[in-house]
Image (cartoon, rainbow, N blue to C red):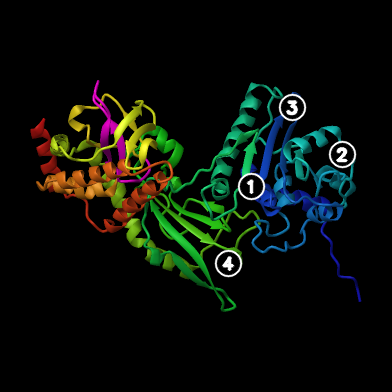
Amino acid sequence: MNDLTNLPDPSRLIFGLRDTGYDFNSAAADIIDNSIAADAENINIRVELHADGRKFVMFGDDGKGMDEKALFAAMRYGAPVRENAKSLGKFGLGLKTASSSVCLRFTLISRKSAGVPLSKLAWDLEHVQDENRWEMLQESVTRSEEDAFDELCGDSGTLLIWSKCDRLLSKNYVEPAGAAETKAVNNRVKKLREHVALVFHRFLDEKDTRCRNVRITIDEEVVSPWNPFYPQRSVQALPDNARELKIELPEGSTETAHMNAWLLPHAKDMTKDENETYAKISSRAQGFYIYREGRLIHNGGWLGVFRSDDPHYSLLRVEFDFGHELDDAFKIDVKKSRILFDPALEDALKERLATIYREADQRYRRKKKQLSSELEVDHSGSNNSIKDAKFTKKPSVQAAIPGTQDAVVNNNRGAGIKIHVPVQGNVDPSSIYVEAVTDITSGRLWEPALRSASNTGFTTGVRINKHHDFYQKIYLKAASLGYAVEGIDLLLWAFAAAEQNNTDEELEPIFEDIRQEISGNLEKLLRDTPLPTDTEIDELSENTDDSE
């Protein structure tokens, strides 16, 4: 029988695999996946531009590391299947295809423990082309590579070096390492930092318990997480009982995906810095954010479920989570950057999100009226009532410095209690106890404060969040209909006074959690409550004008 083995041409295939579809950011993210899969706690990335124009990218981690045998297997195109099915590495191709998409030579150096000699292997695409065979290079570890390993990995772990980086930049520069090329490289680094902050934000956020924590630095700067849902000020729009999706696999088993929908605040209700730092509202950013095992694999766009080019829905972002069990169902590609929804799933998602999709449109359009910033509710009656009350219990302030967030008070917990609250001096005397503000970004309806007019002592005040739905749907409507808002003001002020009278450093986070939960529950309870009508808004505007 004839031998039907038909091996691929080494030169043709290894160069052809450079064009799998990676860009620099997605290639780097794939390398980070491998470090996380190796249980690394620290991942350090360095991008170097040498004086002669040569460019290097280095990835060092303190993960489990590899011996010679494991290193050889890791460098094989089509590496062995990982034992942990949850691993972010999936096809055994990422290290090679991601690396070669950027450079012509990539070197892997590793060891499992301190004191063990470093193992090193390299793929050089030009060498494979010249020899036309699948042959790696095994060379001695250089002094500079040892230094890089020590700096980026520590005692043990793995170092990957990209050299001959012919695709790091999109063009060649006349002056190597000149101002233009240096600027281009710096821009690449900036974009990479933003990409990593988004893709791995659950791993980078110490408060996010869904993923283990990983510290990533790029050129010695720690990458801070960027959560695209801005949970401090956004509304979770899906009820709890609608957040699970049962998906049947071809063989008949059923797996669960998880979903949440977030309605972000309108850009006009944020400062420019707040929007650019936390929300980044844009038409391109609306839509699905898909996570596989906690790692973001797709961000933005509606994947055929809704239109993706209408700015009226730019305040809606949908968080969609699934585990490795659904890889085949969603047809995950090598880069882990593409997902396909089955038509039946598209219909289910459209049905489940239809109401929220319309609400996003209403939220976008009605925010253009700038209800909370243009219309004012009169809180003077509340301030006068609190001022005239003789027997309300307030903490005694020992020390408070305007502009800080710390004060020392005597309260029910004892003398000299340090509390963490806004401290404000030179407050308008007419709003010293109750004031509606636009700078609360925590998502809470209210927060206690210590406030004083000029040359007066500090007293308990309450700051009310004008962005909160309770303010816009209850306060504004009550004011426009002539209902007194004083009762609500007094209730919130009483909460603030009770907190200041009964808190210390240990109880502070408990009170904060209570305010957060109450504020969140109010958002949910008011989800179906309509905003003030145009008539009610006009009446409130007239009342505001008359009071002036």
Range covered by the magenta-colored residues = 441-467
Q: Are marks 3 and 1 in contact (CB under 8 Å)?
A: no
Q: Quick check: marks 1 and 2 in contact, CB under 8 Å? A: no
Q: What is the number of the mark on residue 50?
A: 3
| Proximity of marks 3 and 2: CB atoms separated by less than 8 Å | no
Vertical arrangement, residue 18 with respect to residue 218, above or below = below
Determine crowd level at label 3: few under 14, some 14-19, many 20+ residues with C-alpha closer than 10 A: few
The label number, if any, that marks residue 29 in the structure image: 1
Q: x, y percentage for residue 42?
A: 67, 43
Q: Is residue 254 above or below residue 472?
A: below
Q: Secondary structure at mark 2?
A: loop
Lateral position of residue 391 relative to residue 42, left or right: left
In the image, residue 350 lies at what x, y percent?
Answer: 40, 64
- Horizontal and vertical percent position of residue 145: 81, 36
Q: Give the residue at mark 4.
A: 326
Whichever of callouts 1 and 2 sits on the residue coming sooner in the sequence is 1
Q: Amino acid at mark 4?
A: Leu
Secondary structure under badge 4? helix
Task: Identify the residue shown where x is 29% and y is 54%.
Answer: 522
